[in-house]
Image: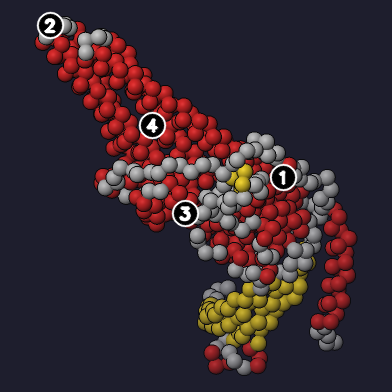
Amino acid sequence: MAIPSPSPRRGLIFVFPAFAAALLLAGCASTGGLAPQEHPIEADSLASSRSLDGPTLSDAAFPARDWWTTLGDPQLDALVREALRDSPSLAAADARLRQAQAQAGLADAARKPTLGASAQETAVQLPETLAPEPLGGDLQASTVLMLNFKWSPDLWGGKRAKYEAAVGQARAAQVDAQAARLTLSSSVARSYVALAQAYEMLDVAQREQARASRLHDLSRQRVDAGIDNQLQLRQSESTIAAAEQQAQAAQQQIDALRNALAALLGKGPDRGLDITRPRLLDAPSPAVPAVLPSELLGHRADVVAARWRVEAASRGIDASKAAFKPSINLNALVGLASAGLSELFSGDALLGFGGPAISLPIFDGGGLRSQLAKSDADYDLAVAGYNQTLVGALHEVTDAVQAARSLDAQIASATQARDAAQSALDIATARYDAGLGTQLDVLAAQRPLLQLEQQLAGLDAQRYAATIDLDSALGGGLVPVGPDAAPHPDTRPDLARAPTP
C-alpha cells in the first residue's frame, strides 16, 4: 500500500496547537518579583537658585563652541585647534565609538532574515572489504548547490529591544567622544593659564632681584662711606641670591608647562619651544543662564551620555523579559543535488527542506531570572550614575560661579594691599638713601611686597581657571542629542552608525 505524502496544510494543523500550548506553558518561567529599584532624579528638584542668586543669573546663552576665545589670546586659539586636530588622546574615545556602533550593527543584523549559498563537490569510495559490489570499490561523486534561509520573527520585541539598547550605548559613546574633546580643550586652556602664571612669577622674581640689586648698590655705597658694615652688604647679597633662585624655579615651571602643552598637542617637546608668552586679557565676569538646572541636561555631555545609558539599560530589561516567551524559527533549504554535472539542473535534482520550529523555556535552572535580575541591576547602576553625574554637574557650576565671585573680591583686596606695600617700600628706600632709616626697614617693607605680588599672580591664574571651569561646567558649547529628542530606531536605520564627531 502506498504511503501518502505529508501535506503542508496538515503540518500547519499541528503547528498552531503546539504554539498555543507553548503560550500556556510560558508561565513556568516567571518574571514575578523582579523589578529595578532606582529612579532618575528630576533636574528641577535640585534647588540652586539661592546659591546662584545675584548678578550672575541672566538670560545669557550657554558658552559658544569655541568658548576659549573669550580669554582673548590668539595663540591659545591656535593651540586648541591644533590639539583637537592632532592629539592622539582622542583616538581611544573615537575607537570606543566605532566599537559601540559596530555592536549596534550586529544587534540590528540579528533581527533580519539571512540567506546563504553554498556549493559542494564530494567523492567517496567504499572498500570492497566493507561493502560488496556495486557499492564497494566504485568511486561515487556528487554535486550539491544549496540556498539556506533562516529567520526568527521578533514576536515579542526582544531583538528590537537589544538593538535599541545597543543604539543607546552607541549614542552614549558618541557623546563621550564629544566630551573627550571638551576635556582636551579645557586641559590645553588650563595649562596655558598655568604658563601665564609661571611667566608672571618670573616677572615677580626679576622685580625682586632688581630691588635687591638696588639695595645692594646702596648698601655698598654706605659701607664705602663708613656708614654701614659688611653685615648689611651680606644681607642684600642674600636677598639677590634668593630672588635668583625664585627666577630659576619660575623658568623651570615655564619649561615644564611648554612640554606639557606640546604633549597635549600630540607633538614632541620641541613644539613647546615655539610657544611664546601668553597674552591673556581680563577674565570675563561670571554669568550663568537663568534656565538652570533643567537646561543643563541638554548641554552637559556627561549628563547626556548618562541618560543614554539609562535608556539602553531600560531596553535591556525589555530584551531580558522577552526571553521568557516562546520563539519561532523558520528554516528553509532549497538546492540541487546529483551524481554528475550533466544531471544537476534536471527536474529530478531538486532538493528541499524547511519548516517552522517552536522553542519555549520551561525549566532552565533559574538562568532567565538571573539574567533579568542582572538587567535590573544594570538599570539601577545606570540610574545611580546618571543621578550622581547630574548632582555633580550642578555643583561644578555653583563652585565655579562662587569661586569667580570670591576671586574677584580677593584680587581687588590684594591689589590694594600691593599698592600700599609698594608705597611703603618707596618710603623706606628713600629714608635709607637719605640716612634716616636702616636696611632692616627696607627689608621689612620689601618682604610683604614680594609676597603680595606672588599672591596676585596666583589669584589671577585662579580667576582664569574659574572662567574655564564655568565654561566647561556649562557644557563647553556642546549640544548633544538626548534620548527624549532622538527618533525611534525603527524609523532611522542609520541611527547606530552616526559619524564620528
- Circle nearer the N terminus (2, 3): 3
Amino acid at circle 2: Gly
- Circle nearer the N terminus (1, 2): 1
Number of residues whose C-alpha sits closer than 10 Å to that of mark 1, classed few (under 14), some (14–19) or many (20 or more): few
Question: On the image, which quarter does residue 484 sit in?
Answer: bottom right
Amino acid at circle 1: Asp
Q: Which residue is mark 2?
A: 226
Q: Which residue lies at the image location 62% right of the left edge and 93% below the top edge?
A: 346
Number of residues whose C-alpha sits closer than 10 Å to that of mark 4, classed few (under 14), some (14–19) or many (20 or more): some
Q: Is residue 335 left or right of residue 366?
A: left
Q: Which residue is mark 1?
A: 44
Q: Which residue is mark 4?
A: 457
- Asked if labels 3 and 4 touch by Cβ distance under 8 angstroms, the answer is no
- Circle nearer the N terminus (4, 3): 3
Amino acid at circle 4: Ala
Q: Which residue lies at the image location 65% right of the left edge and 38% below the top edge?
A: 53
Q: Which residue is mark 3?
A: 66
Q: Nearer the viewer, mark 4 or mark 1?
A: 4
- Circle nearer the N terminus (1, 3): 1
Q: Is residue 19 left or right of residue 428?
A: right
Q: Which residue lies at the image location 57% right of the left edge and 47% below the top edge?
A: 474
- Asked if labels 3 and 2 touch by Cβ distance under 8 angstroms, the answer is no
475 versus 151 height, above or below = above
- Asked if labels 1 and 4 touch by Cβ distance under 8 angstroms, the answer is no
Q: Which residue lies at the image location 61% right of the left edge and 65% below the top edge?
A: 495
Locate residue 287, reporting x and y percent: 56, 44
Mark 2: secondary structure: loop
Gap in Å between the C-alphas at discs 2 and 4?
A: 40 Å
